[in-house]
Image (spheres, rainbow, N blue to C red):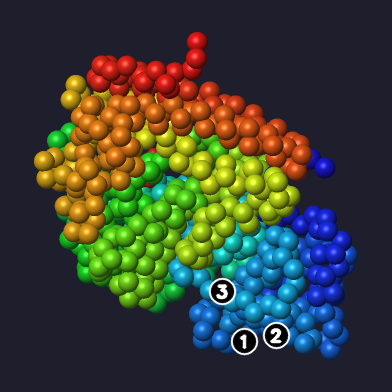
Amino acid sequence: RADDGYRLWLKYDELPEASLRKAWQAQARGITLASASTPTLQTAARELQLGLQGLLGRPVPVGTASGSKGLIRLRVAPDPSLGKEGYRITSQASGLEITGPTDAAVLYGCFALLRQVQTGQQPNQFNLSSQPRIQYRLLNHWDNPNGTVERGYAGSSIWKWHELPERIDPRYQDYARANASIGINGVVLNNVNASARYLTPEYLQKVAALAGVMRPYGIRVYLSVLWAAPKVIGGLPTSDPLDPKVKQWWAARTDEIYRTIPDFGGFLVKANSEGEPGPQDYGRNHADGANMLAAALGNHDGIVMWRAFVYKANSKGDRFKEAYQEFQPLDGQFASKVLVQVKNGPIDFQAREPFHPLFGAMPRTPLVLEVQLTQEYLGFATHLVYLGPLVKECLMADTYAQGPGSTVAKVVDGTLEKHAISGIAGVANIGSDRNWTGHPVGQTNWYAFGRLAWDHTLSPEAVAEEWTKMTLTREPAALASILPVLNQSRDIYVRYTTPMGLHHIMGQTLHYGPEPWLSQSARPDWTSVYYHKADSVGLGFERTARGSNALSLYSPGVRQQWSNPATCPLDYLLWFHHVGWGQRLSTGRTLWDELCTRYYTGADSVLWMQRQWEQARPAVDAELHADVAARLRIQHREALWWRDACVLYFQTYARRPIPPTLMPPT
Ligand code: GCU
């Protein structure tokens, strides 16, 4: 049967191994609710039933009288060791039990059990427990009211605003199922470049309808807000956060939101960034704005996520430093319901960035880590790039803020600085395409985000394996050829596009393909030459004390590693140093030769990806296999485009030959 990718990793085809099926069948004769039923508990039972029936190939009734053997009991029971959302799966004499302190926790436990079955585990003696390390695990949709998606490459928005609230597309429920299965518990429905419209009574009804679909799945809805809303839809002459009428307006709007959506999650704000309005328009700062919204939330159970993605046109400065300069001095001034949302790196979702210097530098403010799942700078839905390693690399980066081991993960999960709230956000790669993400393998990035948000100690390799087994195949030889492709894909992409710390040299506006020669733009800091600084001497952005000194924003432990070009990891070299073309590197090659080597071997590696994928053909659905194979052909063509564009352009400065060993035999 052709697989159109719609079912994502929630594929419940019958287990091919009869013995495994039998073993599980004995453990899953039925499902029983051992606690008072709630919509979420019913959802949990239904999801478990749906999954098991498919996987085991026979009916698994819900509600069978207790007492009989082989029943799976779902029970809500207090357990202080599990937090609010943690679950426990145990084997009892009478059968398996899934417990948790809340009904949502039990739902997560049901999906965890399904994952065990789907990945081919034996129904051994279970004593398994897990709880999320980060409290707010959110997808951020950059979806607009007109159905377009900013930086979306998988069709249009899945939200059909014109049909809501009357018609509920069945897809909304499948979306909620997928999110709940990986522990995502919140969804910002609309673009950070926000329309004020979402705050009108008309749209709140639509938002409420979506919230109704999400609620049984433990998911709350949030909105991005336009700072100027009091002017645009409120009829006020100002949006000054200190103006009493403005405060009153937001408080009244917020009350109305909670009347309409009692479990509304809160607000996400992009202010004074890329032309969006904000408190600075009135001489106020980010804390003034965020705190005013926090006050409007009052006693409602909601939060404000205030984005730190800010930078202004400045040809002399260094964009790297701007968010830090604006936000770090405000540490300690934000209200308790405010989290500051920081992108993983200081520029903008490049294929590899050093961690953002704000992590570890705002100990009195909870920081949300924002990563991008939609591949704005990573080849859209054409290039196969598994982002688990990128997310993990950032989480594991050591800020040294409180000595060695002060990882970004510990800043974000709140343990390092003892915060009561914590959050992580992924900019969604989801659209109306039948397979949700355009590139079938783009689904891994949605999946990996959820799994790492739940538990950042998981390895991206283990997560890739789960996804592949649940989605593509469990056949060992096929896994052996597919998994290395996933795990190395991000590094390969970096090599043929922006090796050794090059960044922001992509095509203007669209952000697709190479344009390192870009020197004219509406703003100097949107050009490529601003970032790569190629000249006759060498290549790279000097960010030591000899240059912009952006390195001074990091702790001494970090500076020590990165400020000396001889010890700076090659992956970050050109982020921080202007290096001579003839400079010899730790690889034994000169900078120029190393650059060429990475571009050439990177592009060649796409051929290796193709061969590996080809080997997996017998084990993977034919339609899906052909789709990915075709995309890999485009990827190779475009890897050559990147390679040739960049090498030939930089050669005009380096004036050195491409090492002959890299050239294909004539
Ligand atoms: C990038 C992206 C924009 C987006 C912005 C943001 O600059 O290109 O489309 O609005 O990030 O994160 O706010």
Q: Is any atom of residue 280 visible in this view? A: no
The amino acid beneath tag 3 is Ser
Front in this rendered view, residue 631 or 128: 128
The amino acid beneath tag 2 is Ser
Task: Name the N-terminal-most of marks 3 and 2.
Answer: 2
Q: Marks 3 and 2, how far apart in space?
A: 21 Å
Q: Is residue 342 left or right of residue 642?
A: left
Residue 196, image x, y percentages: 41, 50
The residue labelled by disc 3 is 130
Task: Name the N-terminal-most of marks 1 and 2.
Answer: 2
Residue 570, image x, y percentages: 31, 41
| Circle on res. 35 | 2
The amino acid beneath tag 1 is Ala
The residue labelled by disc 1 is 77
Task: Tell me what residue is drawn at x 54 percent, y 61 percent.
Answer: 451
Front in this rendered view, residue 383 or 176: 383
Residue depth check, mark 3 versus mark 2: number of the one nearer the observer: 3
- Label total for image: 3
